Image: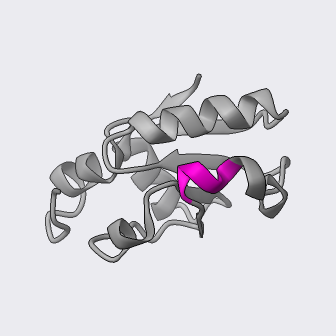
Amino acid sequence: MKEITVQELKEIKDNNESITLLDVREPFEANISNIEVGSVKSIPLDDLASRLDELDKQDQIVAMCRSGARSAKACKLLEEEGFENVANLKGGINQWAMEIDDSLPVY
């Protein structure tokens, strides 16, 4: 499975590249902190298998969660379902908060 770092995601954001950021956290977590990069799609990991039709297999998708574990599972599921341009955000939103945007809480 492909992984990207928060620095690489920041470059994507800074360059306004087309990307779908797939947030697989629970809704209450999205209320704590968010990353605004490209098109953000929130689908909790437990719902992902039944909501695959909400994603486009042609899009570049970066999956994220709090630390990178759930999003790694999401990437595996997406790859098994034929999505080819998928990457996991290494360290998740907490890594983003520590390295990129320290105004976000680490939780």
42 within the magenta span: no
* Colour basis: one colour
Picture quadrant of residue 100: bottom left
Task: Report the residue that reaches farthest toward the top.
Answer: 1
The majority secondary structure of the magenta stretch comes to: helix
Percent x, y of residue 46: 57, 50
Q: Which one is in front, 16 or 57?
A: 57
Residue span colored magenta:
44-48
Q: Is residue 4 left or right of residue 51?
A: left
Q: Which one is in front, 67 or 21?
A: 67
Q: Is residue 53 left or right of residue 104?
A: right
- Quadrant for the N terminus in the image: top right
46 within the magenta span: yes
Percent x, y of residue 95: 25, 46
| Picture layout, residue 94 above or below residue 43 | above
At 20% from the left and 68% from the top, the residue drawn is 104
Percent x, y of residue 21: 57, 58
Q: Which one is in front, 60 or 22?
A: 22
Task: Report the residue that reaches farthest toward the bottom.
Answer: 31
Q: Is residue 68 left or right of residue 53?
A: left
At 85% from the left and 33% from the top, the residue drawn is 82
At 40% from the left and 66% from the top, the residue drawn is 35
- Quadrant for the C terminus in the image: bottom left
At 45% from the left and 40% from the top, the residue drawn is 70
